[in-house]
Amino acid sequence: MTSRFCLRPLRARSRGGFTLIELLVVIAIIAILIGLLLPAVQKVRAAAARMSCSNNLKQLGLAVANYAGSTGDRLPPLTSSTGYPQGGNYQGSILVTLLPYIEQTSLYQVAVSNPSNTWDTLTASGTAVRLQSVKTYMCPSDPTLQDGWPANQVGNWKGASYGANFQVFGAVRAGGNADAPRYNIGNIPDGSSNTVAFAETYAATGDGSNAWAWPGIDWSATMPPVVANTRSWGTTAFGVPQFSPTQAVARKAFSQSAHTGSVLVALMDGSVRGVSGGVNQLTWQCALQGDDGLPLGSNW
């Protein structure tokens, strides 16, 4: 007896796609994960930006110390001038003067090769000194700075996110348009650990800019990289820092910070610290003035 077998082709077992409910559940889980991760990523970025800013200020503090070490303990002037050979006998801000001490010697040499017009001297690339970005002078958190340009100076002057303390570096009028220090590095009456050297400030404010190569206060008080400029702004320059302000309300006279709850400062001893939003006007003023003889308040 012959058996017959009917051979049928095997069919692959079909698998259905996600149901609508399953898809919605997956989307909800992904959304929850993103919601949990995003704040953590933002905190990491903010911490990294704060660390970078702190390192910039540390470099500025070390630059001042190294400048003093090479000039018989003299501090760099807030503004050098062609009539002030002690400061370099060229037109340039303190941030120009400190270029060799932050590994920017070539840019410094180009600038001072034309003493009366340092900011417009052409670099090897054919662009003016004032159009060069200097990374050490830029805070990653500064919302008014984009590719080195202050929001209100695009195409004109590259910016800085730090200002030198006028009370230390610029309180004495010297030869020409120079604004010179009143102390040497070792004789600050209130002590170097109690006196601000540099503080954060926005590259662009509602009433000015912070141009690192700007030649001086006498050219315009709204442009040089400086804080606590009482010569131009009077005692209002001692106003407490503005924390996370918008460009529209930020004032050139004050220090500003985009870091949450604190402004970073470099002290004259080279250390860097954060000053909280709880600092009052008297304590902040005492930290800026190097000779008032008053102790810093408990909110420091």
Image (cartoon, rainbow, N blue to C red):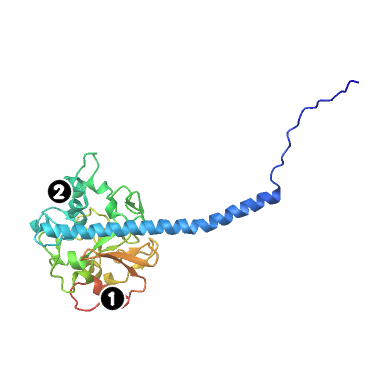
Which sits in the foreground, 15 or 67?
Answer: 15
Q: Position of residue 45 (x, y in %)?
A: 41, 56
Q: Residues within 10 Å of mark 1 (few under 14, many from 20)?
A: some
Mark 1, secondary structure of its residue: helix
Q: Secondary structure at mark 2?
A: helix
Query: Of label 1 and label 2, which has the lower sequence position?
Result: 2
Which residue sits at x=77%, y=27%?
A: 9
Residue drawn at point x = 19 percent, y = 53 percent: 101
| Distance (Cα) linking label 1 and label 2 | 38 Å
Name the kind of residue labelled 2 in the image.
Val
Residue 135 versus residue 168 in the image, above or below: above
Residue type highlighted by circle 1: Thr
Q: Which one is nearer the viewer's eye here, 134 or 24? A: 24
Q: Which residue is mark 2?
A: 112
Indicate the position of residue 16 as horizontal and vertical percent values.
72, 41
**Extreme residue toward the front, this view:** 1
The residue to which callout 1 is attached is 283
Classify residue 237 by image quadrant: bottom left
Which numbered disc covers residue 248? none
